[in-house]
Image (spheres, helix red, strand yellow):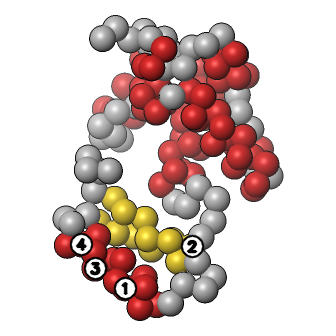
Amino acid sequence: VHILKLVEVVRGADTAETAVDAAVAVARRMGKEPIVVKDSPGFASSRLGVALGLEAMRMVEEGVASAEDIDRAMELGYRHPMGPLRLTDLVGLDVRLDIARYLHETLGAEHFRPPEILERLVGEGKLGRKSGQGFYRWED
């Protein structure tokens, strides 16, 4: 949390506007950049990030480019500090799989269906940095 500038302030169906305003003010006092989002699966940043990561995995499956080159495309072409596959390795492939399954089941959107490569890697125990292997090989 201390690394990220973003804070998503979630407005639920019964959330008072004063509560939203207070949360925004606290976030700003902490030096964060708040956005206000509706209470929905994945909110905004996670939903977008997961969609990007899953598409990157599909591109690896299809042989469009290597994991390294897909990440470099996002880093160099879009100024992302880290590509979606390296980020997935850091978060954990098992965590990303659980989130994708949840979003797919909850929203019914096909683009959240977990790619075969993700299912396979998790099944093989390749969970990313925490296991030493995912889309990348990790050595501590």
Query: 13 left or right of 105?
Result: left
Q: Measure the C-alpha gap from mark 3 to mark 1.
A: 6 Å
Viewer-side residue, 74 vs 101 = 101
Q: Which residue is mark 3?
A: 25
What residue appears at the point 72 percent right and 40 percent down from the top-left corner? 101
Q: Which residue is mark 2?
A: 38
Q: Measure the C-alpha gap from mark 4 to mark 3.
A: 5 Å
Q: Earlier in the sequence, mark 1 or mark 4?
A: 1
Q: Are marks 4 and 3 in contact (CB under 8 Å)?
A: yes
Q: Amino acid under label 4?
A: Arg
Q: Which residue is mark 4?
A: 28
Q: Are marks 3 and 1 in contact (CB under 8 Å)?
A: yes
Q: Measure the C-alpha gap from mark 1 to mark 2.
A: 14 Å
Q: Amino acid under label 3?
A: Ala
Q: Earlier in the sequence, mark 1 or mark 2?
A: 1
**Label 2: element kind:** strand
Q: Which residue is mark 1?
A: 21
Q: Measure the C-alpha gap from mark 1 to mark 4.
A: 11 Å
Residue 126 percent location from the top left of the image: 57, 14
Q: Are marks 3 and 2 in contact (CB under 8 Å)?
A: no
Residue 134 visible to an observer of this rendering:
yes
Local crowd at mark 1 within 10 Å, few (<14), some, or many (≥20)? few
- Tell me the quarter of the image containing the C terminus: top left
